[in-house]
Image (cartoon, helix red, strand yellow):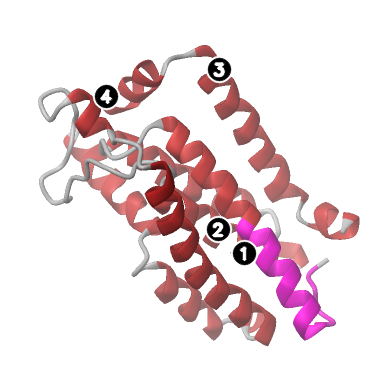
Amino acid sequence: MWSWLRANHFFFLAFLCWMAGGGLLLFLYSREELFFAVNSRHHPVLDLLMGALSGLGRGDCIPFLFLSLLLLRPFREGAYLFATVGHATLSSLLIGLSKQYFGCPRPLLEYGIERVHTVPWLDNAFYNSFPSGHTFGAFGTFALLSFYLPARQRAWSVVFLLLALGCGYSRIYLGQHFLKDVYFGSLYGVLTACFLYWLAARIFKSSSLHA
């Protein structure tokens, strides 16, 4: 366990920084202040960029990303395929159950379409805000990709984490979620990825555990 954590220290240190910084923001500021600090600062170019970043957590994009990486040798192993299929399946189940259980209103329902910045090509949602499914998917995806990177390429996991953060930020920018939704979506996504990586390693007993 400890050797695996040390091997992935780039990812986990960056993730802990996000957990600490995001948690501090949630403690110091109100939900409304945090939401409009992001959502009220918009630009047409940023609309396009945030739309692209948001797509990184979409359920129809994640399987395509996982499968395309099977073309690269480090990812062509049974444990990787098991973990990624498990992620696609488990994330859909957990997010669906969580949203139905908590049933939290989204920013558009809280503040109204007049106050919230949205984009015309995105279907707006009003219910089931917590947690952010896109953020869950993005963080889970990029965590798994980081874990399966060859040792000499582990520094790329910081870039992966920044992409996941960009997806989470975009969900607030596009008026679909609060910071709390994004924060816990990222936590659940990484915890799920850690569990699936551990489970895949146990089942396949791979000699290449990327530790």
At label 4, the amino acid type is Arg
Q: Residues within 10 Å of mark 2 (few under 14, many from 20)?
A: many
Q: What's the mark number on residue 130?
A: none
Residue that carries the numbered disc 4 in the rendered image: 41
Mark 1–mark 2 Cα distance, whole angstroms, equals 6 Å
At horizontal 82% and vertical 82% (from top left) the residue drawn is 205
Residue 127: say if magenta.
no
Mark 4–mark 1 Cα distance, whole angstroms, equals 32 Å
Viewer-proximal residue among 192 and 104: 104
Residue 198 horizontal/vertical position (percent): 75, 68
* Residue 149 lies in quadrant: bottom right
At horizontal 22% and vertical 40% (from top left) the residue drawn is 126
Viewer-proximal residue among 55 and 93: 93
Residue that carries the numbered disc 3 in the rendered image: 27
Q: Is residue 30 left or right of residue 175?
A: right
Residue projecting furthest to the top: 28
* Residue 147 lies in quadrant: bottom right
Mark 2–mark 4 Cα distance, whole angstroms, equals 28 Å
What span is colored magenta in the figure? 192-210
